[in-house]
Amino acid sequence: MRLIGPMLLIFILLAVTINLVDKCNSSKSKRELICTGSFKNRGPVGGGTEIFFLCDKETPPGSYITIGGKKLEKSSVDVTETLYSISGVTPAGNEGVAPIELRNAKGEAIKVFGLDPFTYTNETNASLILKVKKMLSPSRLDNEKAKEYLNQISKDSPEWKNEGERLSMLVDKRIVMDEKRQKKSEGVSIGMTKQDVLDSVWGRPRSINKTHTVYGIHEQWCYDGNNYLYFENGILTSIQN
């Protein structure tokens, strides 16, 4: 499961939001807490969907998350100087939308900003696997939707261990290939790296002239039709065509 990218993005957004709220409420004695969840807001009614939350540093010690009134299972808490993070798996629930709440150690609901509800679906792990397989055919290519279905499968289930993990790696690989194909169809622009250019429609040059100076490495990439690209220390700085 690739959480590093989403977690980093959420961390940055949360930090910026907290800073803005602090500035807006500098004249007030108390502000509303901020807490945001992972991008996984859907999962099977049987529970088991991995999920995490990042709350700000003012979150009271001992606070925990409930979904539809049930405490997050396999829950763990990590507290740093800037964040109060909670992770775990969803409990079993009824089909439909279930509210997510942050509660203090006494079980009292805490008013927070940023918590979206969780949607329980009645689909089984096996049916989700089948949907992903159908989406891997060229005629029904939808990597993002396939990833959404895979995220709903419990990572402790036999379906995930037998097929889900392999399918997830395959979808990730296809997403990377799609990104490369997209670059291939695009032109070049100032600021690109050499690899970006190679991945673009320009591709590999006919020849390369390289000059070493006290300021670094200057390269001239020569293409057919009197088209030239100029790089300074690996960064595209000029386009001549």
Image (cartoon, grey):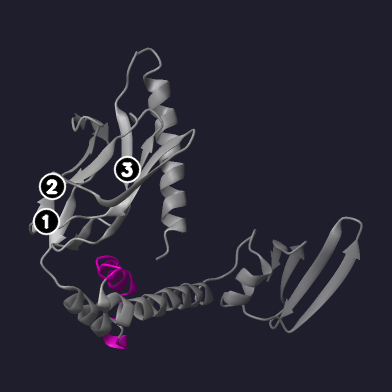
For badge 1, the amino acid type reads Gly
Give the magenta range. 137-156
The secondary element bearing badge 3 is classed as strand
Q: What predominant SS class does the magenta segment belong to?
A: helix
Of residues 236 and 130, the one nearer the viewer is 130
In percent of width and height, residue 38 lies at 33, 52
Q: Of circles 1 and 3, which is in front?
A: 1
Measure how far apart labels 2 and 1 are at the Cα level. Answer: 7 Å
- Amino acid at pointer 2: Gly
Task: Indicate the secondary structure of the residue bearing disc 2.
Answer: loop
Q: Considering only order in the chain, which callout, 1 or 2, is on the residue closer to the N terminus? A: 2
Q: Earlier in the sequence, mark 1 or mark 3?
A: 3
Q: Residue at x 18, y 30 (%)?
A: 108
- Secondary structure of the residue carrying numbered label 1: loop
Pointer 1 with pointer 3, Cβ within 8 A? no
**Residue at left 38%, top 21%?**
24
Q: Position of residue 53 (x, y in %)?
A: 33, 46
What residue sits 78% from the left and 71% below the top? 220
Of the numbered discs in the image, which one, if any, rests on residue 68? 2
Q: Nearer the viewer, residue 88 or 126?
A: 88
14 in magenta: no
Badge 2 vs badge 1, beta-carbon distance below 8 Å: yes
Left/right of residue 213 with respect to residue 180 in the rendered view: right
Q: Amino acid at mark 3?
A: Thr
User: What separation in Å lies between label 3 and label 2 (alpha carbons)?
Assistant: 17 Å
Q: Which residue is mark 3?
A: 36
Q: Position of residue 44 (x, y in %)?
A: 17, 64
Residue at the spot of label 1: 93
Taking 183 as reference, is 132 left or right? left
Q: CA distance from mark 1 to mark 3?
A: 21 Å
